[in-house]
Amino acid sequence: MIEVNKTNFKEEVLKAKGLVMVDFWSPSCGPCKELMPDVHQLAEKYAGQAKFCSLDTTGNKRLAISQKVLGLPTIAFYKDGSKVAELTTEITIDEVEAKLNELK
Amino acid sequence: MAEIYDIVIAGAGPGGLAAGIYGSRSRLKTIILQKGRPGGQAATTEDLENYPGFGRGTTGPALMQAMADHAESFGTEIIRDEVIDVELDGEIKKLKTKSGKEYQAKIVILALGAEPRTLNIKGENKFRGKGVSYCATCDADFFEELDVVVVGNGDAAVEEAMYLTKFAESVTIIVIHDEGILDCNKVSAEKAMANPKIKWVWSSILEEVKGDGLVETILIKNIKTGEITEMPINGVFFFVGTLPKTELVKGKVELNEQGYIVTNEQMETSVPGVYAVGDCRVKYLRQVVTAASDGAIAAVAAEKYLAEEEGFKEQVLSAEEPVMVAFWAPQIEESITALSELEKWLEDSGHGIKLVKIDTYRNQRLVKRYAVDKIPTVLLFHKGELLSKLSGAFSPGELQGQMEIAGA
Ligand SMILES: Cc1cc2nc3c(=O)[nH]c(=O)nc-3n(C[C@H](O)[C@H](O)[C@H](O)COP(=O)(O)OP(=O)(O)OC[C@H]3O[C@@H](n4cnc5c(N)ncnc54)[C@H](O)[C@@H]3O)c2cc1C
């Protein structure tokens, strides 16, 4: 997964063609870390079919808020630079996979 | 055949982890099935300063990591998987998981914990992750220099509100009670009252959360005057209690009206060999220390249960010769007399029948299983089968009759 932050978010996500999935998390968020191994596995499984990014919101708070993310974990999907779907707080990996299949 | 574990624990919060420590330390083959990371709710609170021996500065995630390491160091295996179905009746219990596996166990300890209660207020669900939160440690740092409200006034609400003041500009607590009345402990109440960043709105409830994409305002209703005020806000934290995660075992073990699992003092549920610990069971105080205590009790009770079951199986159910099982109680005089008469009679009769004595005071489980309602009671088993039951006083003639049934 590509690590994105306030310096490369525009380039990697907003200017990217096709489907991009962004996992918003932070080290102090237990549920985020619970989900993370599964998210990484998913990224491997669907490698090449979408771009997978991981965004640590610590130090990137304004960026997260600009993306209307104000709660963790959040997984957002972008298509050609605009947000098309979002899953937040109580997320299961099955929901993420279903959403991914729906959008890819 | 798949491996049969002595103990399978569902849930690795403090309750499940303590059960794991005690279980594997007494050399029982113990595993924990945990959906996601171990630690439970306790790993979602930063300030956890009331676990004995761990004072100021202890964090929930650190304490829970230490408990998980502790359990693993004694041999408890923690497997990341969610239990999705259980079969609890019978001697060998089965637990099906999301990954498609099935685990078999002689003992199941349910340590399923609880999850935050939602109020279903207008906008609450819509703004989840958009300013509505149930987890201060997860989301607090978004609210640096911003204003938040906390809904609720129990221990968790007031303590999390204080944690939030380290980040937010202001934290307003909406309290349903009259001014000055809080459900939380006195120490936290006093601390919060003295905290300059905390503001209070009394006699009020949250009516609605509003915004455009992110939370912008809330409507607060004063329950005395009926007056509704709109307040600009960035975040709304709900700490209004929890609900037990017991959907999985509904209809399989006894639950109370609120869905909590009913247990006795040994943490036994209504199903033999199935125990429940921590926040998911009916109890007075739901904290880390009491969850851990429950876990210890359940594992020790389970160990004794296994020993008794194995003993009964060996001595009675798998014995070659017919076995008489006599239920007595030390405080029932006539049962003591009856027992010694029985012993003598057996000796004289030369039937070669084995006698096993059960102290009903110590072994309530067998009393229940064989519906022993009078003491003394004599059961006759042969080759694992119950052939006859004599309740209350028994005469030599009746005993002779039992012998004939056994063909001895
Ligand atoms: C915000 C907050 C602050 C708190 N502060 C304190 C405090 O300062 N001090 C204190 O003593 N207590 C505190 N508590 C209470 C304390 O966290 C709980 O009492 C304690 O965690 C209960 O432990 P438990 O093991 O019963 O359940 P939980 O901690 O809820 O753990 C249950 C575990 O089981 C897992 N699980 C559930 N269902 C399944 C399934 N089907 N398959 C697999 N795994 C499953 C869950 O994922 C979870 O990890 C706080 C609670 C909250 C919410």
Image: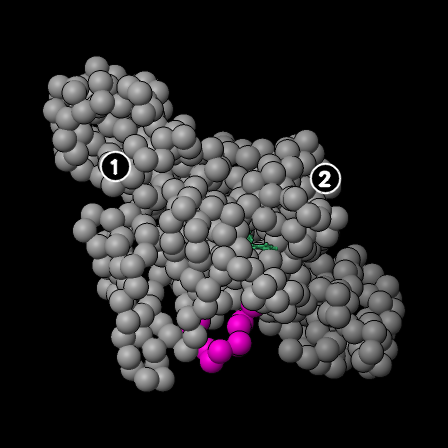
Number of the front mark, 1 or 2 = 1
What residue is shown with label 1? Answer: A66
Q: Is the C-beta separation of discs 1 and 2 under 8 Å?
A: no
Subunit that carries the residue with mark 2: B
Q: Main secondary structure of the magenta part?
A: loop
Residue B27 shows up from this direction: yes
Quadrant of the rendering where the C terminus of chain A is positioned: top left
For the point 39% across and 55% down, the residue is: B148
Q: Is residue B18 left or right of residue A26?
A: right
Q: Is residue B352 magenta?
A: no
Percent x, y of residue B235: 35, 53
- Colour convention of the picture: one colour
- Residue sitting nearer the eye, B229 or B277: B229
Between residue B234 and residue B12, name the one nearer to us. Answer: B234
Query: What secondary structure is found at the residue carrying circle 1?
Result: helix
Could you say where residue B387 lies in the image, as x and y percent from the top left?
A: 60, 64
User: SS of the residue at dot 2?
Assistant: helix
- Determine if the magenta segment contains residue B178: yes
Q: Tell me the amino acid under the disc marked 1.
A: Ser
Q: Which quarter of the rendering shows the N terminus of chain A?
A: top left
The residue that appears at 67% across and 36% down in the rendered structure is B70
Distance from Cα at disc 1 to Cα at disc 2:
51 Å
Q: Of B193 and B398, which appears nearest the observer?
A: B193
Which quadrant holds residue A103?
top left
Left or right, B381 with reference to B210 = right
